[in-house]
Image: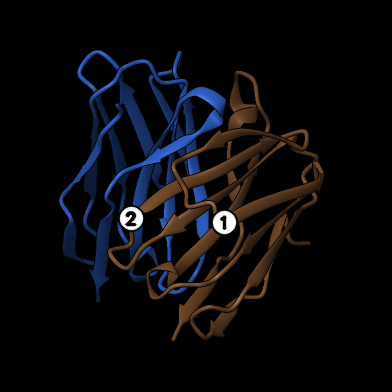
Amino acid sequence: KQEVTQIPAALSVPEGENLVLNCSFTDSAIYNLQWFRQDPGKGLTSLLLIQSSQREQTSGRLNASLDKSSGRSTLYIAASQPGDSATYLCAFTGGGNKLTFGTGTQLKVEL
Amino acid sequence: DTAVSQTPKYLVTQMGNDKSIKCEQNLGHDTMYWYKQDSKKFLKIMFSYNNKELIINETVPNRFSPKSPDKAHLNLHINSLELGDSAVYFCASSQLGGGSNTEAFFGQGTRLTVV
């Protein structure tokens, strides 16, 4: 059974810092990995998708990596801004495109 | 132009009632899902339909009955609502198969409150 853990559970940083969010999983038989952000009271916005054959994907200030051998993925956010404040979720795609979600990291970027 | 839309956004109802949540996607995907986010914000899959066929049913009480009239729509009907059903329900869609096409897109969620 796939278990997905995200560390830290919460993070507060000053604006401008570079930061790393971690995601670990127990079953390496994954298809893809997807990172989402969720704003309070809102839905999920897809940020990045990494296919199982890839090692990383980049979009603007975001970079996500995937290391299946160690069961880890990281989301790197460069030059953080207050608008980045949200909950970040990683999710792994298994059979039937079923997404197994992590526990989330609640990020607050302060002025 | 909303990709995945679900209605209503908020739903407050009494215990014992029956209610439905509707979902539609205009992405041309062949697979749709219902996820439940509990009070601790943990997201877990409930159902998945591929081309109107049920492919995932994750130990959900049979009071929950999904219905997919076509591959662009997946509705969720809940009978005899209980207090513990209070949660946010998210609809999502994706395309089965390998590659980047498996990216999942989510609706804005329906916050269900049972009183």
A22 w.r.t. A77: above or below: above
Of the residues under marks 2 and 1, which one precedes in the sequence? 2
Left or right of B41: which side holds A19? Answer: left
Camera-nearest label, 2 or 1: 1
Classify A31 as above or below B114: above
Q: Quadrant of the N terminus of chain A?
A: top left
Q: Quadrant of the C terminus of chain A?
A: bottom left
Distance between the Cα atoms at labels 2 and 1?
Answer: 19 Å
Q: Secondary structure at mark 1?
A: strand
Q: Colour of chain B?
A: brown
Q: Measuring from the top left, give residue B45's x and y in whole percent.
A: 47, 45
Q: Amino acid at mark 1?
A: Phe
Name the subunit of mark 1: B
Give, as a three-letter code, the residue at label 2.
Answer: Phe
Residue that appears at 60% across and 30% down: B102
Q: Which residue is mark 2?
A: B42
- The answer to whether A97 appears left or right of A89 in the picture is right
Q: Residue under label 1, please give it.
A: B64
Mark 2 and mark 1 on one chain: yes
Position of residue A85 measured from the top left corner of the image (x, y, whole percent):
33, 66
**Label 1 neighbour load within 10 Å: few <14, some 14-19, many 20+:** some
Residue B105 on image: x %, y %: 60, 47
